[in-house]
Amino acid sequence: MNNKSEQLTLIPKIYCSLFGHDYQVTKKVTYHVKEYTCCHCKKQLTTNSNGKLIELTPKFKEINDILERIHSKRMMRLKRKTITSSIY
């Protein structure tokens, strides 16, 4: 039974090694930073400070979570500011 599960996890890796990864955006952290996942082998990537794709480690996952929180607070603050300025 264990051998069967090993074969099933090996198939997507072989597919990606032959045809390349098929990355899809799984999370938009900010306008420029996104998280990607390969739909076949489930490999996760993110963009670094230079805009290049790198592997999503726990360190970068934490950085992206904090960055997303800061970005959403800033967008909410800007939205409130435009609403109050349009009233006057």
Image: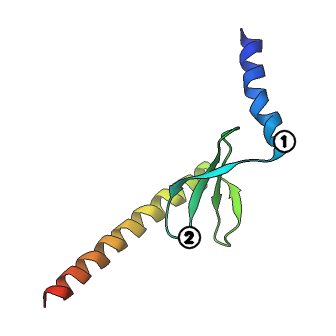
67, above or below 2, in the image? below
Which residue: 69% across, 38% down? 40
The residues bearing labels 1 and 2 have C-alpha atoms spaced at a distance of 28 Å
Q: Which mark is residue 78?
A: none
16, above or below 36, in the image? above
29, above or below 14, in the image? below
Count every numbered label the image shows and give the total.
2
Q: Quadrant of residue 77?
A: bottom left
Q: Position of residue 37 (x, y in %)?
A: 63, 47
The quadrant in which the N terminus is found is top right
Decide which of 80, 60 is in the foreground and name it.
80
Which residue: 19% across, 87% down? 86
Most distant residue in the top direction = 1
The quadrant in which the C terminus is found is bottom left
Which residue: 18% across, 83% down? 84
Determine the secondary structure under disc 1.
helix
Q: Position of residue 85 (x, y in %)?
A: 20, 88
Task: Give the amino acid type for the residue marked by disc 2 in the picture.
Answer: His
Most distant residue in the left direction = 88
Q: Going by the image, does 13 lie left or right of 25?
A: right
Within 10 Å of disc 2 (Cα), the crowding (few <14, some 14-19, many 20+) is few
Q: Which residue is mark 1?
A: 17
Determine the secondary structure under disc 2.
loop
Q: Which mark is residue 32?
A: 2
Decide which of 49, 23 is in the foreground and name it.
23
